[in-house]
Amino acid sequence: MNRRNFSKCLITAVSATMIAPGISSGYNPVQKTVRLGGPVFKKYSDPAEWILALKELGYRAAYCPVGLDAKSDEIALYKKAAKEADIVIAEVGAWSNPIDEDKKKRETAIEKCIKSLQLADEIGANCCVNISGSRNPENWAGPHKDNLTDETFEMIVETTRKIIDAVKPTNTFFALETMPWAYPDSVESYLNLIKAIDRPRFAVHLDPVNLVISPQVYFRNSEMIRDAFTKLGKYIKSCHAKDILLLGNELTPHLSEVRAGLGNLDYMVYLECLAGLGDVPLMLEHLNSGAEYNQAADYIRSVGKKENIFL
């Protein structure tokens, strides 16, 4: 990526800040850093041990270190430790299906989202994130013929409003992760959700791999990434780091999630555009071991080093 393309990414970030007033982007045209983070496999029993484990991994961002059952004094201690160590708590995962067809499961999922958002607000995480859900009765996050319909869109709007209104967060945001077979499944559908939900504390969690849903996007994913940052950059609070690979030579395409560095995602464009947003973390996920996470982190740092982006 040359300087001209880097400038384009910075320009797109500036453009994004003018799309919808009300949410600060943190955009800094001088800063060229990205906060990389991921899971901590080392056991910790207090904030000091947690911070040490993060430092050993070279992370400047972290997943929430406590669960939904944590007491306020414990949450306060971890929040204080993160601030003092310059660690950004990127997100609290509320992984569940708040549009489940089963009423009891749906209510349980919504309650989990509310408690997760409360935790995110109390600990000062950038966001609380979930998927929008699925109409699939067998798989809470799976594909279904009714997922991408107007009816489901309205369900998502209603449910998301309910979650945000129940908490009324002031220190964090509620976000929905992009998904290949559920809303938001594109930049445009995310913009539509932002407008329809109409809550200032609704934001964006970007996972560009989940938006690679065809060979066309696969081979031109750098354009998709730039478009996402142009239109959604203002709202982005946390991002995921993984990769995607088009497998085999069969007639029908098979897109498979892989470790960062083993696929085709344009990490140079991704990092340069992300660096324009300031303290928006990039969080590694979906790997099986600490060794794999180290390999992924090494690859992403090596890409950043080429453009003098510190991770």
Image (spheres, helix red, strand yellow):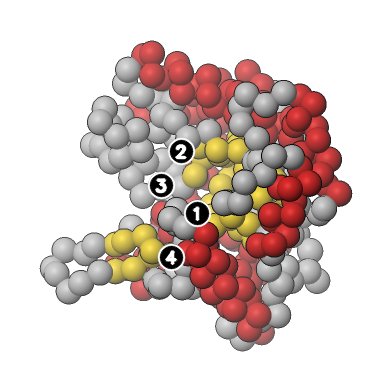
Q: Which mark is residue 285?
A: 1
Name the one closer to the observer, 273 or 139: 139
In the image: residue 305, left or right of residue 76: left
- Residue for badge 2: 131
Name the element at disc 2.
Answer: loop
Answer with mark 4 or mark 3, whichever residue precedes in sequence: 3
**Which amino acid does the dot numbered 2 rest on?**
Ile
Answer with mark 3 or mark 1, whichever residue precedes in sequence: 3
Name the one closer to the observer, 289 or 122: 289
Q: Which mark is residue 259?
A: 4
In the image: residue 239, left or right of residue 171: left
**Which amino acid does the dot numbered 4 rest on?**
Arg
Q: Quadrant of the N terminus?
A: bottom right
Q: Which is more foreground, mark 4 or mark 3? A: 4
Residues under numbered marks 2 and 4 in contact, where contact means CB atoms less than 8 Å apart: no
- Identify the residue shown where x is 28% and y is 41%: 143
- Identify the residue shown where x is 63% and y is 57%: 37
- Residue for badge 3: 179
Residues under numbered marks 3 and 2 in contact, where contact means CB atoms less than 8 Å apart: yes
- Percent position (x, y) of residue 46? 74, 40
